[in-house]
Amino acid sequence: MTTTNPPAADRGRRVFHGWWIVTTFAITQTIGYGSLYYAFAVLLHPVATDLRTSPAVVTGAFTTAILAQAVAAVPVGRWLDRHGGRALMTTGAVLGAGMLIAWSQVRTAGQLYLIFAGLGVAMAMALYEAATPVLVSWFDATRRPKAILGMIVVAGFASTIFMPLTGWLNDRHGWRTTLLILAVLYGTVAVPLHLLVVRRPPVAARESRHSASAYRRTLIRAAIRDSRFWWLAAAFVAHAAAMTTMTVHLVGYLTSRGHPATFAATIAGLLGVLSVTGRLLLTATGRRVRLHRLVAAIFALQAAAALSLPLLAGTRPGAILAVVAFGLGFGISSLATPQLLADRYGTTAYASIAGTLAAFVTFAKAGAPLAAAGLLSSSGGYLVALTAIGGACLVAAGGILIRAATPSPAGRFGVKGRAPASYEPRPPPPEHTSRT
């Protein structure tokens, strides 16, 4: 048995270049999310007007992108484990820039749907789902949280930067030229940075490809059979559904309670800033409180905020209080998921296991707002939807706690089914190695 921490001979070199990768991802993820993801919300109505279709039809194209991203998550994870992130993320950046250019030229809704399917694949190849496994492979358990935090704290401001920028560009140049500008910006920055900076860690590059591949398959099968993985999946799927539903329907709910649209949009905009606050809180307290307990407590706080929103949202201070409490947990999944998965299953097959989880989570993000819209139509009000959001957060908190309490079959990941942090078996030696 051996830990996944790098040997002393490689540690300094790995961590030094690893921080260059963190810096690269902080830049490319900010531009990537701003261009490939957040620009859509700003350009939705101009695109619908120009194509002479409804906003609902154009929104369906974005749902197609999310579904394509979910489908691509598993093969992307397998590729990352086998080959690393350089070629994949560089190709993803090229594809993303190309899809933005193609989007700028669409004339029909059918063309839009095809392009957004490609855009979803590009997001799976170039955004968090690909970047996080690269960082996990470079950093040991001690430095990993800070490395991932360094990326997502900066990228957390993507909406703050790019939504106003996209709106300004659209006002001056129209949506088609705006997309061309975003494509050039993303392509000229992300493609060379991914190509020149992203690489596999030295230890991974020296491993036997045959033995590592066989061992990864063993780890993946073991994880899929592990009940803790499915409790973790249930927790993060429920949480993703709650977060996406709140994001889509918060402004509408606040305006339905009599608040001006400007106030409602401003309060909803706090969610992005609060997601950074929650991530910093998680990192600052993570060494004093066990991670699963802290994550479960934040999820429970979100449940309380959602369930109390009908009581508090009638006044501005009450609405702000409830949204702030809910927003503290808005972005912690992107930081907690890598830690929980890597601590449990190690880093050898991390990308494949994380890709499987990401597929379920992304499907939830695509379907939850539609389900909530159905609840609103059938119930005639937001109370049922907010209750569902609060219930989903409680399910997420319970799933995290049950995941920590549920034993696994003895010997699967460690002694008596419990794995120390960053603990995994050494891959079998190559066939030609003598076994004395």
Image (tube, grey):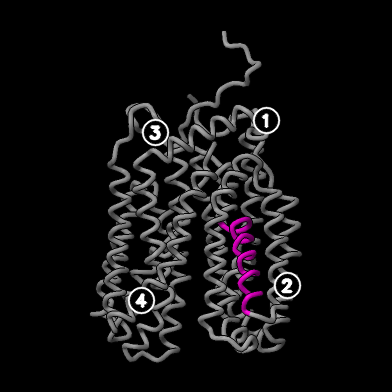
- Name the main secondary structure of what is drawn in magenta: helix
Q: Earlier in the sequence, mark 1 or mark 4?
A: 1
Describe the element under mark 4 as helix, strand or loop.
helix
Residue behind mark 1: 206
| Residue 155: quadrant of the picture | bottom right
Q: Is residue 113 above or below residue 292?
A: below
Residue occupying the point 66% across, 56% down: 24
The type of residue carrying mark 4 is: Gly
Q: Is residue 374 above or below residue 148?
A: below
Residue behind mark 4: 374
Describe the element under mark 1 as helix, strand or loop.
helix
**Badge 4: few (under 14), some or many (20 or more) residues near its Cα, within 10 Å?**
few
- Marker disc for residue 419: 3
Q: Is residue 236 above or below residue 61?
A: above
The type of residue carrying mark 2 is: Ile
Viewer-nearest residue: 5 or 182: 182
- Marker disc for residue 101: 2
Q: Nearer the viewer, mark 1 or mark 2?
A: 2
